[in-house]
C-alpha cells in the first residue's frame, strides 16, 4: 500500500477531513485549523511524487508587510527557530508559515507518528502566534 493510501485510510478511520489534491509535484492534503487564542491557519501535508518525502506546512500564521518591522521580524524568526528543534518558521513576502520535512526513504508511513509530529508543529505555531500578532499590530 502506498504512503498516500496509508495516510488517506488513517484519516478516514479517524474521521478527520482533509481535502486531497494532486498536482505535478505530488499529492497534498489540507485543512483549516483554528487556534484557541483566535488565529486560524491552513495545515498542509504534502507527499512528493515518490512518497519518500513528506513536507508538513502551516500557512497563514501572520502577515507582516511593514518594511519598518522587518528587522524585528527576522529577530523573532531567529529566536523561534533557535527555540524549536523541528519547527522552522519562514517569511515569504511578509507571510509567516511553519515547516517541517520528514524523510521516509523506503520506510512505510506510520500515520500515528506523522500525526504526532503534525500536532507538535501546530502546537508550536499556536504558541508562537501571539508573538507574531504583537509584532504585526504594534
Image (tube, rainbow, N blue to C red):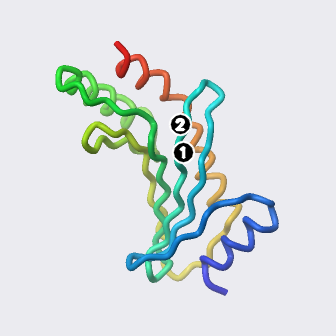
* Left or right: residue 67 compared with residue 78: left
Q: Is residue 118 above or below residue 109?
A: above
Q: Nearer the viewer, residue 3 or 44?
A: 44
Per the image, label 1 sits on a secondary structure element best described as helix
Which quadrant of the view contains residue 11? bottom right
User: Which residue is label 2 attached to?
Assistant: 124
**Residue at 26% in and 30% down:** 65
Query: Residue 90, how many percent across, how many down?
Result: 33, 43
Query: Residue 82, how many percent across, how many down?
Result: 37, 35
User: Which residue is label 1 attached to?
Assistant: 121
Which residue occupies the extreme top position in the image? 138
Q: Is residue 56 above or below residue 129?
A: below
Q: Visible in this render: residue 132?
A: yes
Residue 59: give its label.
Answer: none
Q: Visible in this render: residue 104?
A: no
Which quadrant of the view contains residue 16? bottom right
Q: Is residue 38 above or below residue 13?
A: above
Badge 2: how crowded within 10 Å, few (<14), some, or many (20+)? some
**Residue at 18% in and 26% down:** 67
Query: Residue 18, how many percent across, how many down?
Result: 64, 61
Badge 1: how crowded within 10 Å, few (<14), some, or many (20+)? many
Q: Is the C-beta separation of discs 2 and 1 under 8 Å?
A: yes
Query: Residue 28, how many percent across, how many down?
Result: 52, 68
| Number of numbered tags placed on the structure image | 2
**Residue at 49% in and 22% down:** 130
Per the image, label 2 sits on a secondary structure element best described as helix
Which quadrant of the view contains residue 112? bottom right
Amino acid at each position: 500500500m502506498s504512503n498516500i493510501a496509508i495516510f488517506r485510510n488513517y484519516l478516514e478511520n479517524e474521521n478527520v477531513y482533509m481535502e486531497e489534491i494532486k498536482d505535478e509535484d505530488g499529492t497534498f492534503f489540507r485543512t483549516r485549523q483554528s487556534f484557541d487564542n483566535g488565529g486560524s491557519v491552513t495545515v498542509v501535508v504534502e507527499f512528493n511524487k515518490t512518497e519518500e518525502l513528506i513536507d508538513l506546512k502551516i500557512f497563514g500564521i501572520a502577515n507582516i508587510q511593514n518594511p519598518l518591522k522587518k528587522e524585528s521580524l527576522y529577530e523573532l524568526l531567529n529566536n523561534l527557530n533557535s527555540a524549536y528543534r523541528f519547527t522552522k518558521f519562514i517569511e515569504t513576502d511578509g507571510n509567516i508559515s511553519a515547516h517541517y520535512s520528514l524523510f521516509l526513504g523506503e520506510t512505510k508511513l506510520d500515520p500515528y507518528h506523522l500525526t504526532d509530529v503534525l500536532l507538535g508543529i501546530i502546537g508550536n505555531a499556536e504558541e508562537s502566534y501571539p508573538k507574531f500578532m504583537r509584532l504585526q499590530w504594534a
